[in-house]
Image: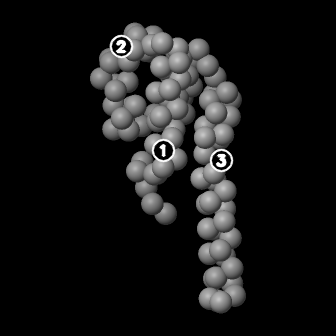
């Protein structure tokens, strides 16, 4: 399995984090104040240089006036095509492993 840090789903996740912030008309520095963190941290997270754990994500989303369920639904909608592709590739690998190449 490849590292998720450099994957399309992670790119979509980061883009959604940024998009939610922009929809709220917040600058990185505005979000940083709400989080009690530095603007540099917000920048590093949005660029993918720093990851959020689940508890940080919940706090981040609260600072953006949203919740994890809403965010997860939005993320799922953006990833739906990717998820279908992963399932198709996994099924193909299983068929190949089970029945040999056809």
Residue that appears at 34% across and 27% down: 43
Q: In the rendering, which numbered label is found on residue 80?
A: 3
For disc 1, the neighbor class at 10 Å (few under 14, some 14 to 19, many from 20) is some
Residue that appears at 69% across and 87% down: 99
SS of the residue at dot 3? helix
The residue that label 1 is drawn on is: 10
What is the C-alpha distance between the residues marked 2 and 1? 23 Å
Nearer to us of marks 2 and 3 is 3
Asked if labels 1 and 3 touch by Cβ distance under 8 angstroms, the answer is no
Residue 28 in which image quadrant: top left
Residue that appears at 45% across and 51% down: 7
Q: Is residue 71 visible?
A: yes
Q: Position of residue 46 (x, y in %)?
A: 40, 31
Q: How many marks?
A: 3
Residue closest to the far left: 40
Residue 48 in which image quadrant: top left
Q: Position of residue 6 (x, y in %)?
A: 40, 50
Is 12 drawn above or below residue 101 in the view shown? above
What is the C-alpha distance between the residues marked 3 and 1? 14 Å
Asked if labels 1 and 2 touch by Cβ distance under 8 angstroms, the answer is no
Q: Is residue 59 visible?
A: no
Q: Position of residue 94 (x, y in %)?
A: 66, 76
Closest to the observer, 81 or 72: 81
- Tell me the quadrant of the picture where the C terminus can be found: bottom right
Earlier in the chain: of badge 2 and badge 3, it is: 2
Is 96 drawn above or below residue 26 in the view shown? below
Is 79 drawn above or below residue 25 in the view shown? below
The residue that label 2 is drawn on is: 29
Asked if labels 3 and 2 touch by Cβ distance under 8 angstroms, the answer is no
């Amino acid at each position: 399995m490849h590292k998720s840090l450099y994957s399309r789903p992670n790119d979509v996740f980061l883009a959604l984090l940024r998009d939610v912030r922009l929809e709220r008309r917040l600058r990185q520095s505005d979000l940083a104040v709400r989080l009690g963190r530095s603007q540099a941290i917000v920048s590093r997270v949005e660029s993918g240089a720093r990851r959020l754990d689940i508890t940080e994500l919940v706090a981040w989303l609260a600072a953006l006036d949203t919740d994890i369920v809403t965010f997860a639904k939005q993320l799922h909608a953006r990833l739906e095509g990717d998820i279908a592709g992963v399932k198709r590739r996994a099924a193909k690998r299983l068929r190949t492993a089970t029945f040999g190449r056809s």
